[in-house]
Amino acid sequence: MSTDVTTAGLRAFTEDWLGWYRAHEERLAGPHGFLAVTGLHWLDERPRRFPDAPGAWHTGRDGVVVTLDEDEELIVEGSPVRGEHRFGVLPERGGVNAVWGDAVIEVAKRGGNDIVRPRHPDAPLRAGFTGTPAYPPHPRWAVTGRYLPFDEPRPTTVGAAVEGLEHVYDAPGRIEFALDGRRLSLTAFPGPGEGRLMVLFTDATSGVTTYAANRSLTVEPPAADGTVVLDFNRAVNLPCAYTDLATCPLPPAENRLPVAGQKIPRERGGA
């Protein structure tokens, strides 16, 4: 996209970005969004209770199990459960949200580990959220690239926000593009929604004005000829930028770029 834009064109571009930005912030700050998380509990074979969730929880070969007291109840997939409930073996990066009053109890698997991560609407982090600072959007950061699929998806191991944890993604291909006259490339992972891609990256601002560990960009499905649009104005922080109660993946080493996006959250000292 050309950097030579009219005032009207820039205004329209900015208004479109603002609509996207506001919707993203609303999802982040939703009653059960990531700002509502109150605990990250790692399960093992010992039944344990947690202060922000009902029941005693454990996991093993047959998956996650919760044992509820007589006066406790969860709503799982629309049905009330009491006593012992077996969630079964959860898929990696999958999970179930069980409702407990006005809270949601996330039961999930991350990095091969079963976790319980309660989400309460009155969580202090959510209550104090004032929005994420961002750079002003500009069309210069929206570029056309080309998606080049690999012959076979490549298992790619990356680190995580939690020390010692690893994530494995099947990278389906890479995206090549030019930015400010520089030829660049990004390893792509499967994204949210059919055909979408997701790239994790850092850049020259990481750890200075943007979150040091990672940022994420969703890319719409490639056209028939592999054409994609990377709008780095819409690069977002992952949950670990706001809270230590996240297991976010880190970018592969090759995904370091000279671009901008959302800044360090105020919750981490950003301005």
Image: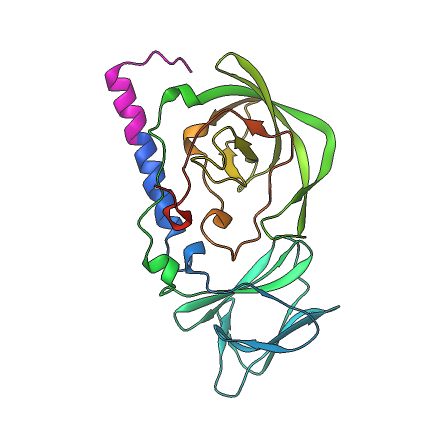
Give percent across and percent down for residue 173. Answer: 66, 29
Residue at position x 47%, y 47% in the image: 241
* View extreme (bottom): residue: 70
Q: Total label count?
A: 0
Give percent across and percent down for residue 117. Answer: 53, 63
Q: Is residue 10 magenta?
A: yes
Which stretch did the figure color magenta? 1-15
Residue closest to the eye, 234 or 50 = 50
Q: Is residue 207 magenta?
A: no
Q: Quadrant of residue 83?
A: bottom right
Residue closest to the eye, 222 or 185 = 185
Q: Quadrant of residue 188?
A: top right
Residue closest to the eye, 111 or 244 = 244
Give percent across and percent down for residue 197. Answer: 56, 34
Quadrant of the image containing the N terminus: top left
Residue 137 against residue 25 in the figure, above or below: above
Quadrant of the image containing the C terminus: top left
Q: Quadrant of residue 232?
A: top left
Residue 57 against residue 42 in the figure, above or below: below
Drawn side of residue 190 relative to residue 38, left or right: right
Give percent across and percent down for residue 195. Answer: 57, 35
For residue 225, say whether it is visible.
no
Residue at position x 44%, y 50% in the image: 242
For residue 252, say whether it is visible.
yes
Q: Is the image coloured rainbow, by chain, by secondary structure, or in one colour?
A: rainbow
Residue at position x 29%, y 21% in the image: 10
